[in-house]
Amino acid sequence: MKKILAALAASLLSLSAYSQSLPPPTIAAKSWLLLDVNSNQVLASQDATMRVEPASLTKIMTAYLTFAAIKDKRLDLNQTVNVSVRAWKVDPSSSKMFIDPATPVKINDLLYGLMVQSGNDAAVALAEAVAGTEDAFVTLMNKEAARMGMKATHFSNPHGLPSADTYTTAQDLALLATREIKDYPEFYKIDSVKSFTYNKITQQNRNRLLWLDPTVDGMKTGHTESAGYSLIASAKRPNGTSGERRLIAVVIGTTSDQMRTQEGQKLLNWGFQNFDTVKLYSKGQAIDTPRVWKGNHNAVKVGFTDDMFVTIPKGTADKMKPVLEHKDPLVAPIQQGSQVGTLRMMVDGKAVVTLPVLALEAVDQAGMFGRAWDAVRLWFK
């Protein structure tokens, strides 16, 4: 899977180059990016690798690690934890869910307080519940960011309050958002909740798109004076006869709550209106069986270990042509899942996307005689 994601990331420029005939909308933000989750392709972006302050978008990572702890049974949704003075005393001028050291609180409530109310106190309480201390949790955050491939990200706290050591990019945030949606769909639904009441205080979700666009089902806003107003919004809409399609819009550093909402909506609408996502191949489907030399089998099935999609401008699906290239000669041993070639999807002679083609089965070496015989045959190939 890591090889596939890496190759897809490398293919994003191919899509951008082909899509220059579709000028993206003008977005009033410091940095932004629009991602198709099904194909993992960026449809458009501006300054997506610029270092930015994530503010409360940091809480997506805090939630992700909490979800992991629940899945691993290190925590339980109905488990109650004590509220530390450190969590209670988090910057009183910032957003809070208003937990109290005198009242133990459920993990479930803390998650809603984190993602719906954007409580900084909830972030600290969850960090302590998962890792024991806030500092230990921050270490986990950075390890997980590295594992995901968030190469330009560093965290110094679980809530995103300003710190010179907390930074990221729109590109990395899109990756984090994708991982939450794909890895924990059962918890992602929290992001779509419009309001939550705790301690007799009801607070609304700051993601205004949840009210304006019924296809939007998450995920998080962020704001500090230095960061401006930011938003990660995700929407799922019908994709013709191919089921549903999900986009993620990352908008960083706008001038107001209204502006981040407007620009996020603009990006989502542009992506859905101008592109189609097409399923190319199914997981495990053999797209070719190239010749193998010096192996205990003469051929190997190749394809993909996940369903493969491609996103293209509307009206161009019928023009797509696959061009498969594999290593020649293919010599055993071949490990299952190893890359043995590439598949380029071409439209009008231009590569829309380049995908890694993997061995769907292992091929061991042949015996001494078989290897010697194929070595001779290769001389004359």
Image: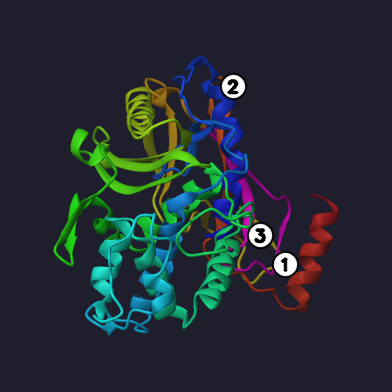
Q: Left or right? Give the position of 292 relative to 25.
A: right
**Residue bearing mark 1:** 294
**Residue 106 is at least partly visible in this image:** yes
- Give the structural element (helix, strand or loop) at label 3: strand
Q: Which one is in front in this view, the residue at disc 1 or the one at disc 2? A: 2
- Kindly identify the amino acid type of the residue bearing the numbered disc 1: Lys
The answer to whether the residues at label 1 and label 2 have Cβ atoms under 8 Å apart is no
**Residue 284 is at least partly visible in this image:** no
User: Which residue reaches farthest left?
Assistant: 200
The image quarter containing residue 258 is top left
State which region is magenta.
Answer: 322-345
**Residue bearing mark 2:** 349
Q: Where is residue 65 in the image (x, y as percent from the top left)?
A: 43, 69
**Residue bearing mark 3:** 292
Q: How many labels were placed on the picture? A: 3
- How dense is the environment of label 3, judged by Cα within 10 Å: few (below 14), some, or many (20 and up)? many
- Determine the CA span between mark 1 and mark 3: 7 Å
- Determine the CA span between mark 1 and mark 2: 36 Å
- The residue that appears at 42% across and 22% down in the rendered structure is 316
